[in-house]
Image (spheres, helix red, strand yellow):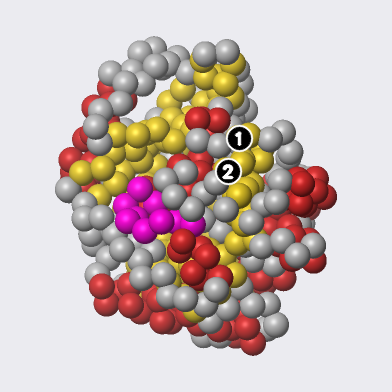
């Protein structure tokens, strides 16, 4: 089969790495790809939002299946366009992707189908939003309704911070159209975890749970980011909790989308908080998570392409997993998630037997790699315990010099070790 992966980040490189292992792949393309993907796929200079050119390319190269990584083309209707042109695509339609594309739609959907989540209200008027905050108090969560590259969420510890977030989004238009409406939520407490699933209409096949670290700095300090690291599986999440999450969250969502006339095909992701009352949904994503994908896919025994084909053809994929754990730490450009410099040469990273690198914001210049984004790459490690998987990553990074222009968190997964 000829395969096209749409996207340019770490999630897409992880998908490419998994697909490259499949004996069923004849030719593997990435559009636009990144520096690291060039080792496993042919990168083509087509932007992920240029849907017309992607359709044209898929026809010209006789692409048998297209896999979409990022959320923006999903919400722009890439799956609809491919389907209209008779092209197979593993991705939800624009109508189904609205579950991620609009926080307000997602909250109303969860309320309608009795899916556990935080109490909320939606606003377009700053004065009304501020009154609601003053009535509810802090801590409280303010979210841009639309897509903001994982950065449109403010967990306000004080009312002053919350009121400033309202001004930033509704008055200052910090996130442009994505923040023209905001959702204000109750602040849930507990441990976060993520559960992704392969979905085709009402068929739901969960992957391993993972835990992402969103804050930029050690100790879960600093601004929210797209994710600074992750590990999988999650030892403190029991089998009973995972069963509940499958039945009462993921399956209810898939069935509800059918009822709404928005049947879902692709990856459904639930970002969850393990509260004293059980798991509650923080957010739904309608694609592979980033960086969770980078630590979940390396543990999967199955041929990823065969799984996708089976799911789309209505066959159970019988997912199998390697024993052990996988931890990944993101190396980011200094300044991220704010402004940062591009074009900084990446240092050499010497890998051991159980470590790996996933490229995100990189470009290849002659024989070297340079930074081309906020999150530059992820260094991963696999081992038979969460402690040793984390240690493999940090031992690898400790030997990297120089790290000028880059930073990484030094505590990813460390609360497993009793440090956080």
Residue interval drawn in magenta: 297-305
Whether residue 176 is visible, yes or no, is no
Q: Secondary structure at mark 1?
A: strand
Q: Residue drawn 56% across and 58% down?
A: 287
How far apart are the two marked residues, 1 and 2, measured between alpha carbons? Answer: 8 Å
Q: Please determine whether, in this image, residue 364 is positioned above or below residue 14.
A: above
Depth order, front residue of 106/85: 85
Which residue carries the number 2 mark?
A: 27
Residue at image point 35% right, 13% down? 401
In the image, is residue 353 part of the stretch drawn in magenta? no
- Residue 135, given in percent of the width and then of the height, sits at 58, 69
The image shows residue 116 at horizontal and vertical percentages of: 47, 78
Left or right: 99 in relation to 407: right
* Element on which disc 2 rests: strand
Q: Is residue 133 left or right of residue 207?
A: right
Question: In this rendering, is residue 162 above or below 29?
Answer: below
Q: Which mark is residue 42?
A: 1
Proximity of marks 1 and 2: CB atoms separated by less than 8 Å = yes
Q: Vertically, is 103 above or below 277?
A: above
Q: Residue 150, position in %: x, y? A: 58, 49
361 shown above or below 25: above
Q: Residue at x 39, y 75 (%)?
A: 245
Left or right: where does residue 276 sit relative to residue 142? left
Instruction: State whether residue 246 appears in this view.
Output: yes
Question: At which x and y percent is residue 99?
Answer: 63, 68
């Amino acid at each position: 089969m000829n395969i096209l992966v749409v996207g340019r980040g770490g999630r897409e490189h992880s998908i490419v790495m998994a697909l490259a292992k499949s004996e069923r792949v004849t030719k593997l393309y990435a559009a636009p790809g990144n520096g690291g993907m060039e080792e496993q796929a042919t990168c083509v200079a087509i932007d992920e939002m240029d849907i017309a050119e992607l359709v044209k390319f898929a026809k010209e190269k006789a692409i048998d299946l297209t896999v979409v990584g990022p959320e923006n083309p999903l919400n722009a209707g890439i799956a609809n366009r491919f389907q209209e042109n008779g092209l197979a695509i593993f991705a939800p339609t624009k109508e189904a992707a609205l579950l991620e594309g609009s926080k307000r739609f997602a909250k109303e959907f969860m309320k309608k189908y009795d899916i556990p989540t935080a109490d909320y209200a939606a606003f377009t008027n700053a004065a009304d939003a501020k009154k609601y905050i003053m009535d509810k108090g802090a801590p409280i969560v303010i979210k841009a309704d639309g897509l903001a590259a994982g950065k449109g969420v403010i967990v306000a510890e004080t009312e002053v911070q919350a009121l400033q977030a309202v001004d930033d989004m509704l008055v200052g238009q910090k996130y442009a159209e994505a923040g023209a409406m905001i959702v204000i939520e109750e602040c849930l407490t507990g441990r976060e975890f993520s559960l992704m699933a392969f979905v085709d209409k009402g068929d739901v096949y969960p992957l391993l749970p993972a835990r992402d670290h969103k804050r930029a700095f050690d100790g879960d300090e600093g601004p929210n980011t797209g994710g600074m690291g992750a590990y999988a599986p999650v030892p403190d999440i029991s089998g009973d909790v995972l069963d509940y999450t499958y039945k009462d969250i993921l399956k209810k969502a898939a069935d509800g989308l059918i009822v709404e006339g928005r049947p879902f095909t692709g990856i459904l992701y639930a970002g969850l908080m393990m509260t004293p009352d059980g798991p509650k949904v923080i957010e739904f994503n309608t694609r592979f998570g980033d960086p969770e994908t980078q630590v979940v896919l390396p543990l999967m025994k199955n041929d990823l392409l065969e799984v996708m084909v089976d799911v789309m053809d209505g066959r159970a994929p019988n997912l199998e997993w390697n024993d052990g754990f996988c931890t990944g730490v993101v190396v980011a450009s200094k300044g991220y998630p704010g402004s940062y410099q591009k074009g900084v040469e990446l240092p050499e990273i010497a890998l051991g037997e159980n470590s790996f690198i996933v490229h995100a914001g990189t470009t290849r210049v002659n024989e070297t790699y340079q930074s081309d984004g906020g999150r530059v790459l992820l260094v991963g490690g696999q081992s038979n315990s969460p402690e040793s998987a984390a240690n493999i990553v940090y031992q690898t990074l400790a030997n990297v010099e120089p790290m000028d222009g880059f930073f990484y968190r030094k505590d990813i997964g460390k609360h497993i070790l009793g440090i956080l």
